[in-house]
Amino acid sequence: MSPQAGATFWAEDQRKIHIQLRDPYLNEWEDNPYTKGVFMATLCHEIVHACQHLTGRNGFKVPHMEEDPECSRDEYYFDPMEVEARVLADYYSEKYTSDLI
Ligand SMILES: [Zn+2]
């Protein structure tokens, strides 16, 4: 799944958070541990974004890492909130979902 496999949205009144995930089985992915693992990691990634919103956490930068201002993907990949979401998604996915896969 690509980084666009999930998204987190906040309601204007800030009272609701909507997490949207692409169902890999609707995209003809095989039912195997890899597919389940990617799906769980994507869910955890979006939950981290929800937690960032609820706690006011803004992620973190990778020290001494320069992004290419000409590359739009760099803007996404090195965004501090995305860096934190990727790091914690792997941690939460391994800790909380490995027994489910
Ligand atoms: Zn993200």
Image (cartoon, rainbow, N blue to C red):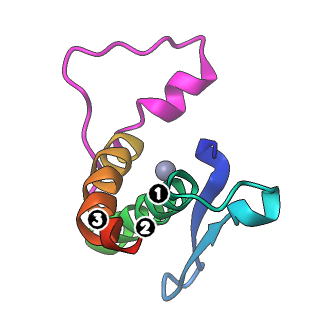
Classify 10 Å Cα crowding around label 3: few (below 14), some (14-19), many (20 and above).
few
Q: Which residues are magenta?
A: 56-80
Residue placed under numbered mark 3 in the picture? 56
Which residue corresponds to the image point at 30% horizontal and 47% vertical from the top-left?
84
Instruction: Determine the CA span between mark 3 and mark 2.
Output: 31 Å
Mark 2 is surrounded, within 10 Å at the Cα level, by few (under 14), some (14 to 19) or many (20 or more) other residues, namely few
| Circle 2 residue | 101
Q: Residue at x 58, y 25 (%)?
A: 73
Residue shown at the point (80%, 57%) measured from the top left: 27
The numbered mark, 3 or 2, whose residue comes first in the sequence reads 3
Residue type beneath disc 1: Gly
- Neighbor class of circle 1 (other Cα within 10 Å; few <14, some 14-19, many 20+) is some
Please state which amino acid type lies under the numbered disc 3: Gly
Disc 2 element? loop
x and y percent of residue 100 in the render? 39, 74
Q: Nearer the viewer, mark 3 or mark 1?
A: 1
Q: Are marks 2 and 1 in contact (CB under 8 Å)?
A: yes
- Residue 95 spot, x, y in % from top left: 23, 64
Quarter of the picture containing the C terminus is: bottom left
Q: CA distance from mark 3 to mark 1?
A: 28 Å
